[in-house]
């Protein structure tokens, strides 16, 4: 039979450390949400407005201050397109829903080839992500257009069973702020697919 001897001081310290770790995890979750809100406010985004993709039960939000315009495309691949521009004109982009059932990595390669015929692409970085439980990708790169405008570009792709969502953001390179990708992620994660 073995006799176990416990040092009460060490056990007390371990319990205090575990308790502090639990408090820190709780505070991190609370501050993470506050950081998103602060980031939105720093970029003059006061509220988000909900948009609906007709016939797809897909909803997402954009800043209510931004101007939007829906466009229709023939061909049936792009079933929804909503362009947007920020109130100061420094940021623009669009939200799309594609019916195209193709491997997204193949889609990126083809899309990049087409874009490089008209633009200069630098710093192309593709990462796998998970958005609200759906597989997705984030694509970041620098783009110089034919007319020499320079942009920081962020694209987000979210796969669903019969389509994929595409969020695209272009920011004038000289107006880019380090907290903007946090805003983009907040907007992207605002989507809801109701089945």
Image (cartoon, rainbow, N blue to C red):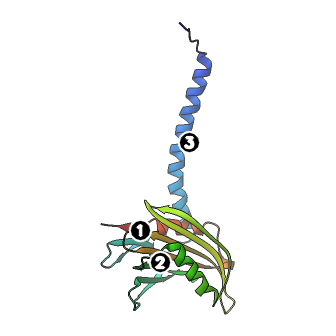
Contact, CB < 8 Å: mark 2 with mark 3?
A: no
- Identify the residue position indicated by label 2 in the image: 65
Q: Is residue 115 left or right of residue 30?
A: right
**Dot in front, 1 or 2:** 1
Residue visible at 69% across and 89% down in the picture: 148
Q: How much space separates mark 1 and mark 3, taking CA atoms?
A: 29 Å
Return the x and y of residue 23 as percentages of the image width and height: 53, 39
Crowd around label 3: few <14 · some 14–19 · many ≥20 (10 Å): few
Numbered circle sitting on residue 42: none
Residue visible at 46% across and 69% down in the picture: 158
Crowd around label 1: few <14 · some 14–19 · many ≥20 (10 Å): many
Mark closest to the chain's N terminus, 1 or 2: 2
Element class at badge 1: loop
Return the x and y of residue 100 as percentages of the image width and height: 42, 79
Q: Is residue 110 above or below residue 179?
A: below
Q: How much space separates mark 2 and mark 3, taking CA atoms?
A: 35 Å
Numbered circle sitting on residue 191: 1
Return the x and y of residue 72 as percentages of the image width and height: 39, 89
Q: Is residue 10 above or below residue 179?
A: above
Mark closest to the chain's N terminus, 1 or 3: 3
Element class at badge 2: loop
Q: Is residue 60 above or below residue 82?
A: above
- Identify the residue position indicated by label 3 in the image: 24
Element class at badge 3: helix
């Amino acid at each position: 039979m073995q006799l176990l001897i416990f040092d009460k001081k060490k056990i007390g310290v371990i319990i205090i450390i575990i308790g502090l770790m639990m408090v820190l995890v709780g505070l991190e979750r609370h501050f993470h949400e506050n950081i998103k809100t602060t980031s939105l406010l720093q970029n003059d985004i006061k509220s988000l407005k909900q948009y609906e993709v007709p016939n797809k039960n897909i909803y997402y939000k954009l800043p209510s201050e931004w101007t939007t315009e829906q466009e229709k495309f023939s061909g049936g691949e792009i079933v929804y397109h909503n362009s947007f521009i920020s109130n100061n004109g420094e940021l623009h982009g669009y939200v799309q829903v594609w019916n195209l059932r193709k491997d997204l990595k193949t889609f990126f390669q083809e899309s990049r080839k087409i874009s490089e015929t008209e633009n200069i692409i630098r710093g192309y970085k593709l990462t796998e992500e998970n958005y609200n439980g759906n597989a997705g990708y984030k694509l970041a790169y620098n783009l110089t257009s034919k007319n020499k405008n320079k942009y920081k570009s962020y694209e987000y792709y979210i796969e669903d069973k019969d389509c994929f969502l595409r969020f695209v953001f272009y920011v004038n390179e000289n107006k880019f702020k380090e907290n903007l990708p946090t805003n983009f992620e907040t907007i992207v994660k605002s989507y809801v697919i109701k089945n």
